[in-house]
Amino acid sequence: MHSATHQAIDAVWRIESAKIVATVARMVRDIGVAEELAQDALVAALENWPVKGVPQNPVAWLMTTAKNRALDRLRRDKSLGEKLEQIGHDLEAQEALIVPDFVDALDDARADEIGDDLLRLIFTACHPVLSTEARVALTLKLLGGLTTHEIARAYLVPEPTVAQRIVRAKRTLSEARVPFELPHGDALGERLASVLEVVYLVFNEGYTATAGEDWMRPALCDEALRLGRMLAELAPAQSEVHGLVALMELQASRASARVDASGRPVLLMAQDRARWDHLLIRRGLAALERAAKLGGALGPYALQATIAACHAGAGTPEQTDWPRIAAIYDALAQVSPSPVVELNRAVAVGMAFGPAAGLEIIDGLQGEKSLRNYQWLPSVRGDLLAKLGRNDEARAEFERAAELAGNARERELLLARAKDLA
């Protein structure tokens, strides 16, 4: 009986904890305190429900308990007068906070106070004042409901390291007096970009793990997709949110075809396309269409999603429209220039116009500091050299790429390619 009750508590907490923390954070104006109070409510459930039974509305029970804890905390607070004055001003100014440039983005969430609270929580957890690692850990903890142990296991880092990141992140937000509010004006673009970056970083770590024995970590992909879909519901008029969702849906559609029965990587051109998930492809294309209707077809995530859509629309590798993909990379290089974009553009140009054309771009990246330890630079160069029949040079590049690879499966793949050229 107790086991079933604990499972029910765990399930409710995993799904609803973010809403509870977000609602309490609006009351106390401190994410760290809000999480502590939400955890108090969880402890109360663990103590009460096995004895008295699971309440008819478990979410409401947890929310009410957490709110009551928050009110008790405010009453005990030495600066109660200041807190109440601030809360009073916030309640009076709540409509004024939703400024014109954000009104459309919040049409759906506005009718739902919890939706606004969740948005505030997302923007606060992903605040640029925090390091990238801290933003990722805090987002997974607060929005994903993951335990510190689960985050540590997903990223193959010691649990105390993750715990320290989360503690430091909450302390930084408190010391920097980061307001628990929706960004507006010029701050909106920067803050939204920070949120989307965190979600995509989580997805990428799941899609191609940087270290460990497994090439993919599907749980992280699923969590990023859940966060992206939630964000799209809460901010439906933000085109780049839909662009990111489209990109993740389309990339995730290939997940089951990216590894063989033994867990070894299968590269795009060798994948069994019958194993691609067509429901995810449809969802991705629909999200991409929404981004375009909102005027965001040329946003960085939407452009990458358009490239993924080109692959999704090709029934066989030979049907891939590489000239179009190369042209989209040209546009992406204008909108969001980076060495990694240039590297991917080299692949597309090599496929569209021949390996020599791709190699010319790659050779221009050889001195790029940010790619010095990036295994895909020598890997792509090796592939292009092999296509040109320069096997000895290609083999050396694949061996160098294998030395740089932190993922065991990736290393095996690269060494196998080098061996094939011997």
Image: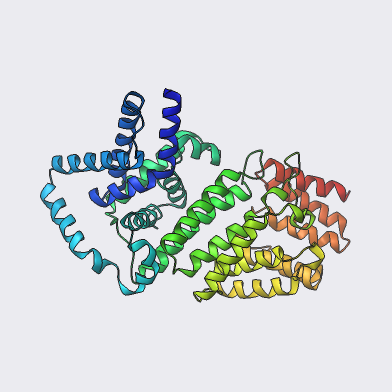
Which is nearer the eye, 412 or 398?
Answer: 412
The structure's colour scheme is: rainbow
Q: Position of residue 3 (x, y in %)?
A: 45, 24
- Total marks shown come to 0
**Rendered residue at 29%/44% (across/down):** 34
- Image side of residue 407 versus residue 394, left or right: left
Residue 388 falls left or right of residue 362: right
Tell me where residue 323 appears, x and y as whole percent.
74, 74
Q: Is residue 107 above or below residue 406?
A: below
Q: Quadrant of the N terminus?
A: top left
**Horizontal and vertical percent for residue 11?**
45, 37
Judged from this view, the residue extending furthest toward the left is 81
Residue 258 in sight: no
Q: Nearer the viewer, residue 127 or 379?
A: 127
Q: Residue at position x 70%, y 71% from top?
A: 325
Q: Residue at x 54, y 62 (%)?
A: 244
- Residue 173 appears in the figure: yes
| Position in image of residue 179 (x %, y %) | 28, 57
Q: Is residue 76 left or right of residue 253?
A: left
Out of 214 and 240, give the one closest to the viewer: 240
| Quarter holding residue 392 | bottom right
Q: Is residue 298 above or below residue 370?
A: below
Q: Residue furthest front?
A: 56
Residue 43 lies in what quarter of the image?
top left
**Rendered residue at 15%/57% (across/down):** 88
